[in-house]
Image (tube, rainbow, N blue to C red):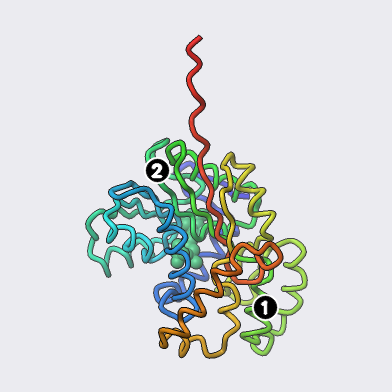
Amino acid sequence: MARWQQDGTVTDPAVADATAYYDLGGEADRLDEPLGRVEFGRTVEVVGALLPASPAVVADIGGGPGRYSLWLAARGHRVHHRDLMPAHVEHLRSTAGDPPGVDTAVADARRLDLADSSVDAVLLLGPLYHLYARADRLQALAEARRIARPGAPVFVAAISRWAPRLHGLLVNRLYGRHADMAAMVDRMEGDGVMSPLFPGSFCGYAHRPGELRAEIEEAGLAVDDLVSVEGLAFALPDLEQRLADPVDREVVFASARAVQRVPELLGLGPHLLAVARVPPEPPVDRD
Ligand SMILES: C[S@@+](CC[C@H](N)C(=O)[O-])C[C@H]1O[C@@H](n2cnc3c(N)ncnc32)[C@H](O)[C@@H]1O
């Protein structure tokens, strides 16, 4: 659980581990890789269908190097991009050159600098991956709820509990490089905590679908939808070639769409995406 200092900074293992991982610099191009392109394409499909009409005010919390913020700004929205990593904020500033419509700053999803009920939608695509403690995840969700207007959609991404085994061990055969990985995966399937395998390895928290839904609801948000983002695309060894062919590409996306809400398959793909909503304001009692 986080320990906040008087100067507003925080010390906890989640921040230290995330910093060690992102300091290696792999996040800037992640969404350009074949599986990242499926993740981005499917996410904007779900988010784009439910965003309010532009120009709306959208908070991209844990926005990383800013790919979704730039997409939102290109659609005419005003964006508050916030991320825990100064390097990601700097990346967005330096590559996009203070993009019009986007304000960016370092902030922790658990303690945001944005006013109550000030945004029309929230993207929370990343912070829950890194918060080990349930209380911290609930705090990040509660902050998303606090800053969003009544009725606003809140999009929440999580890593599936089975991604380390299916993607890491089975597909990427990481046991060859990290002898401890199989034991770590056995353990994390019980408690969700992906512990570091080496300094700077990816680590954090992986959700079961029902657990993600329960956490979002406990934070006071209503869950409208919960989908698997990539489906089985992560397991295709020739994904890059398929994405280069218009027919094959459409089959990859159509297959992910076709199974996205099948309850038995929700945890199969690497990412879960929940569409939540801030409850509408109760009608004023005039008696
Ligand atoms: C895997 S990246 C995802 C970036 C982007 N949203 C995307 O979906 O491609 C996760 C991001 O969450 C950020 N993050 C992790 N913990 C956070 C926290 N407590 N508050 C704000 N951002 C956080 C990380 O710095 C990182 O940029």
Crowding near the residue tagged with mark 1, few <14, some 14–19, many ≥20 C-alpha atoms within 10 Å: some
Q: Nearer the viewer, residue 258 or 212?
A: 258
Residue for point 56% across, 55% down: 274
Q: Residue furthest top?
A: 287
Residue type, mark 2 in image: Asp
Residue for point 51% across, 80% down: 251
Which numbered tag is attached to residue 166? 1
Q: Position of residue 231 (x, y in %)?
A: 59, 72
Q: Nearer the viewer, residue 263 or 178?
A: 263
User: Quadrant location of residue 25?
Assistant: bottom left
The answer to whether residue 19 is left or right of residue 184 is left
Residue for point 64% across, 42% down: 218
Q: Position of residue 141 (x, y in %)?
A: 55, 47
Q: Position of residue 54 (x, y in %)?
A: 30, 50
Secondary structure under tag 2 reads loop
The vertical placement of 230 against 190, above or below, is below
Q: Nearer the viewer, residue 242 or 74?
A: 242
Cα distance between the residues tagged 2 and 1: 38 Å
The vertical placement of 222 against 261, above or below, is above
The residue where tag 2 is placed is 113
Secondary structure under tag 1 reads helix
